[in-house]
Image (cartoon, helix red, strand yellow):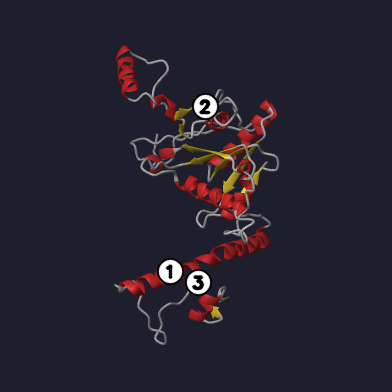
């Protein structure tokens, strides 16, 4: 049993509830998942926001605090790496983050580029309050996502980030008009507070993400860079050196029909080995096309 964490839940369950709430019992008969009339359905959906969803952020931070007390490991909804003075930011989630941190270290040491990494540990609920503050005044932000939605205006993370940045600008514009419309978000008082945003797709089907690709994402943002607003990493639409005359003719036909095809890909100028000294890299291949299901389980 746990203390019921929110007022809305206290109304339903009382001051104490099971960790997995008990919804059905003989003293409190309820129906769920039934067909509802329009008025009742809309009321139930609208009630989710104030009574349940709006509590998620505070409950998440409470869980992180409890986890830190139990393990000593500290987490936040957004984790930053070398963000204190970063001009350029690689933003993403999951397994790309350690690679991005290694690339940030490398570019700082080898080229004196102030690169930082922003790890969205939670999504959804989108941590706009933390993201808006973290991105304020940066020169460029590459939002890298393991997804593609060709018919959407932006990819999922980028849509949330554009919305957050737009609300931060609205906060700055409304300062003299009775207060910020979104007081939980940062206030961008100047247009220069808004960073340049670049959207990249990587890793579809677990395709490799090498340091070269992340370096290319940073180089794309630099002064004099290609400044492509949406691009793909670690993929070639056209080969610079076709292998056969037939392939060359095929590529010429494609490029004539789609002149911007070559611009969809971004490549870095180098692909350094950023593995720790003395480490060994192991690649596991599957046989038979089952992908991750059979990886490391197929007999030689």
Viewer-nearest of discs 3 and 2: 2
Q: CA distance from mark 3 to mark 1?
A: 9 Å
Residue 118 seen in the figure: yes
The residue at the point 55 percent across, 67 percent down is 55
Mark 1 residue element: helix
Please give left or right for residue 278 compared with residue 232 in the image. Answer: right
Q: Which circle marks residue 88 in the picture? A: none
**Distance of label 3 from label 2 (alpha carbons):** 47 Å
Image label count: 3
Q: Nearer the viewer, residue 202 or 136?
A: 136
Q: Quadrant of residue 73?
A: bottom right
**In what quadrant of the picture does the N terminus appear?**
bottom right
Q: Mark 3 vs mark 2: which is more N-terminal?
A: 3
Q: Which mark is residue 51?
A: 3
Helix, strand or loop under label 2 = loop
Distance from the alpha carbon under mark 2 to that under mark 1: 45 Å
* Discs 3/1, front: 1
State whether residue 235 is above or below residue 142: above
Rate crowding at label 1 as few (under 14), some (14 to 19) or many (20 or more) other CA atoms within 10 Å.
few
Q: How many residues crowd mark 3 within 10 Å: few (<14), some (14–19), many (20+)?
A: few
Residue 131: in sight, yes or no?
no
Residue 264 falls in image quadrant: top left
Q: Tell me the number on the disc at residue 226.
A: 2
> In the image, residue 140 lies at what x, y percent?
59, 37
Furthest residue in direction front, as rendered: 177
Query: Mark 2 or mark 1, which has the lower sequence index?
Result: 1
- The answer to the question of whether label 3 and label 1 lie on touching residues, with beta carbons closer than 8 A, is no
Q: Position of residue 250 (x, y in %)?
A: 30, 19
From the image, tell me which residue sits under label 1. 46
Contact flag, marks 2 and 1 (Cβ < 8 Å) = no
């Amino acid at each position: 049993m746990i203390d019921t964490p929110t007022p809305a839940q206290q109304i339903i369950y009382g001051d104490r509830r099971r960790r997995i709430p008990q919804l059905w019992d003989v003293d409190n008969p309820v129906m769920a998942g039934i067909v509802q009339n329009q008025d009742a359905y809309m009321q139930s959906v609208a009630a989710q926001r104030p009574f349940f969803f709006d509590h998620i952020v505070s409950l998440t931070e409470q869980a992180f605090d409890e986890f830190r007390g139990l393990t000593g490991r500290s987490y936040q909804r957004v984790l930053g790496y070398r963000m204190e003075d970063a001009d350029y930011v690689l933003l993403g989630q999951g397994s790309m983050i350690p690679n991005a941190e290694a690339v940030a270290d490398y570019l700082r040491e080898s080229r004196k580029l102030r690169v930082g990494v922003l790890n969205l540990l939670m999504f959804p609920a989108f941590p706009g309050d933390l993201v808006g503050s973290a991105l304020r005044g940066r020169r460029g932000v590459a939002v890298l996502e393991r997804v593609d939605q060709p018919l959407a205006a932006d990819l999922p993370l980028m849509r949330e980030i554009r919305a957050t940045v737009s609300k931060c600008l609205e906060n700055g514009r409304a300062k003299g008009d009775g207060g910020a419309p979104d007081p939980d978000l940062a206030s961008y008082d100047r247009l220069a507070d808004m960073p340049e945003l670049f959207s990249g797709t990587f890793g579809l089907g677990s395709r490799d993400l090498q340091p070269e690709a992340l370096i290319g994402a940073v180089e794309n943002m630099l002064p004099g860079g290609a400044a492509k607003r949406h691009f793909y990493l670690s993929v070639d639409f056209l080969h610079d050196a076709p292998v056969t005359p037939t392939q060359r003719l095929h590529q010429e036909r494609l490029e004539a029909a789609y002149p911007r095809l070559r611009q969809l890909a971004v490549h870095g100028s180098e692909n350094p080995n950023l593995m720790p000294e003395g480490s060994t890299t192991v690649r596991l291949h599957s046989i038979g096309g089952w992908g991750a299901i059979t990886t490391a389980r197929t007999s030689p």
